[in-house]
Amino acid sequence: MSDAVTVNGKIGKTILVMSGKGGVGKSTVAVNIAAALAHAGKKVGILDADIHGPSIPTMLGLEGAKTTGRDGMMHPIERNGIAVMSMGFFLDDLKDPVIWRGPMKMNVIKQFITEVAWGELDVLVVDLPPGTGDEPLSVCQLIGKVDGAVIVTTPQRVAAVDVMKSVSFCHELSVPVVGVVENMSGFVCPKCGETTDIFMTDGGRRLASEMRIPFLGAVPIDPLIVRSGDGGYPMTDIDQHNETHRRFADIVKGIEHFLTL
Ligand code: ADP
């Protein structure tokens, strides 16, 4: 990857969280993976590379936060033991659209990699822009050394094509696939806690097996996830040992194992 730049900092492992399309819970999964790893004592950073839809600041309770510059470097904002950098820290209002062409967006991403004082991290989690087009491709090429990609999908059969595209994308760029997370898999009733399968479930597991890639786990549709995302705290930060919490813990175990963290 000839365009690669060097991350400013001492980064142990870099993982991408990607999805074939938007709205499947990519950022939710990225934030919860980062938070769970931080809980496990790892030094974690999260780079929100989604320039158009930076939702990480909201999900981590950092709406309105602004990054500071020192010694010619930008400094990530620390939250719950996670070093965070996002385009959201440069917008007056997160509702403002970013109307930029490709080169400008890539310049910002380049700066997020080379001009942010990331320090020493065990893991840098990169929340990629959705899809498998120009933007995620350019971000991957800039980052260069990537240790693995977590692919987030939903259970419906139509999502299978998106997973296949994401896997091909990784193969094309020689990025190892950590595995597939099937999000919105079944619904957890907030009253009785019972799980109901709304869409077909297990599509992700079957697909992963067909494509010979690991299946990391399934996360149900859980109102607590919406509440935590909107409320600015990761689900995995709540000491609440419900099913969703357990599912995330299993997914993170798989990632730790893959990365030998
Ligand atoms: P993406 O990054 O793929 O665009 P997000 O992570 O921003 O998707 O999630 C989109 C919306 O769906 C958010 O409001 C989030 O809280 C919600 N969401 C994601 N996963 C779940 C889930 N498992 N259960 C309930 N809501 C979810």
Image (tube, helix red, strand yellow):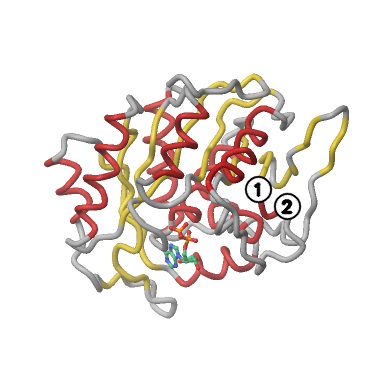
Give the residue at x 68% y 39%: 83
Give the residue at x 64% y 67%: 231
Residue furthest right in the image: 71
- Graded by Cα atoms within 10 Å as few (under 14), some (14 to 19) or many (20 or more), the crowding at tag 2 reads many
* Residue under label 1: 86
Which disc, if any, is residue 25?
none
- From the viewer's perspective, tell me whether residue 7 is left or right of residue 161: right
x, y percent for residue 159:
24, 58
Compared with 173, 62 (above or below) is below
Query: Considering depth in this image, is 14 or 244 the residue closer to the camera?
Result: 14
SS for callout 2: helix
How far apart are the alpha carbons under marks 2 and 1? 6 Å
Query: Considering depth in this image, is 193 or 154 the residue closer to the camera?
Result: 154
Q: Is residue 157 visible?
A: yes
* Residue under label 2: 89
Q: Is residue 238 visible?
A: no
Dot 2 and dot 1 residues touching (CB under 8 Å): yes
x, y percent for residue 93:
73, 66
Compared with 226, 83 (above or below) is above
- Image quarter where the N terminus lies is top left
Tell me which corner region of the image, top left, top right, bottom left or bottom right, holds residue 175: top left
- From the viewer's perspective, tell me whether residue 227 is left or right of residue 93: left
The mark total stands at: 2
